[in-house]
Amino acid sequence: MAYGKIKADAIIYDNSGSDVEKTIASLAAAAPSASPTFTGTVTVPTASANDNTTKAASTAYVQTELGDYATLAAPALTGTATGVNLTLSGTLTVNGTTTTVASTNTTIADNLLELNSGASSNANDSGIIIERGSTGDNAIFAWDESADKFIVGTTTGTASSTGNITIAAGTLVTSTVEDSKGNVRSIPQNTQGSTYTLVAADAGKHILASGAVTIPNSVFAAGDAVTIVNNTGGDLALTASVSVLYNTADAATGNRTLATRGMATILFGSATSAYISGAGLS
């Protein structure tokens, strides 16, 4: 077999029965089939949507596929969005009717939880409902809007209930119960070492007195009670500045004397009248 060179400007090849002419210059400018490097604008056929082969992807195909994905900035999601280990560094706003959290444990770093947020006024009871299923009515810790009080108990209400929820008061077990005056299982003490005039803050307290005590007029309200204990070895004078002070032993009115180590309780029927009884009272 002989080898040699041919000098030509073009070649002609058969393409399914048709002669096709190619210049030698065009062949020299053609890209190699292995790892070609293209310049200018390269056009390839656009594959069908979601094509999962090794075909070249045109820009039209890429744009179609990207249309199936949310943007990084302000994405608008539709349908059901599913994610794993989602961490958000910005503000999360959830709109809709119901938000369901099915995690086993829920922990919240915020030290305050605000319910009924944004309400300009309120006619709804607010609180936390615990679903109990077939065990019984739901448990609830709530603010009773109509009564203007907190209440703990049970209810047939659910998370979708509004307005005045019917709540059956339940039992609250705690180690200590306090009001504005202190532990309700003890009677707060006000120790006075000399002459003293009762004040409104003494309601519900006992006065450990070492001097005369004056019972003022128009200071206390109906239902207020004050106990006076004589903490001395002698008699104490109880001066009735209140309009009427009745001795429950004999209905006598006026000033009283409390004997040594005696104790007497004053119950106010109104701001201007009171009843007194006790041991060592005369």
Image (cartoon, rainbow, N blue to C red):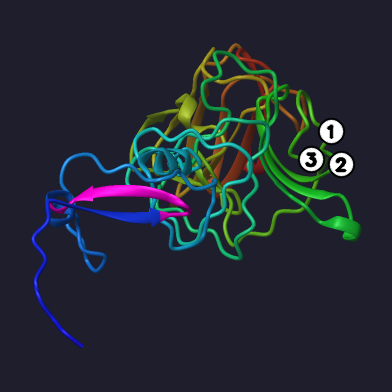
Most common SS among magenta residues: strand
Label 3 sits on residue: 158
Q: Residue at (80%, 31%) from the top-left corner?
A: 165
**Neighbourhood count class around disc 3 (C-alpha, 10 Å): few under 14, some 14–19, many 20 upward:** some
Q: Position of residue 180 (x, y in %)?
A: 50, 38
Label 1 sits on residue: 166
Q: Is residue 45 left or right of residue 143?
A: left
Q: Position of residue 265 (x, y in %)?
A: 63, 38
Q: Residue at (69%, 18%) from the top-left corner?
A: 123
The quarter in which the C terminus is drawn is top right
Label 2 sits on residue: 156
Q: Is residue 162 magenta?
A: no
Q: Nearer the viewer, residue 130 or 230?
A: 130
Residues in magenta?
15-24
User: Disc 2 vs disc 3: Cβ atoms closer than 8 Å?
Assistant: yes
Q: Is residue 22 magenta?
A: yes
Which kind of residue does numbered mark 3 sit on?
Thr
Q: Is residue 143 left or right of residue 153?
A: left
Instruction: Kindly report which numbered mark, 2 or 1, lies closer to the viewer in this rendering.
Output: 2
Q: Nearer the viewer, residue 20 or 166?
A: 20
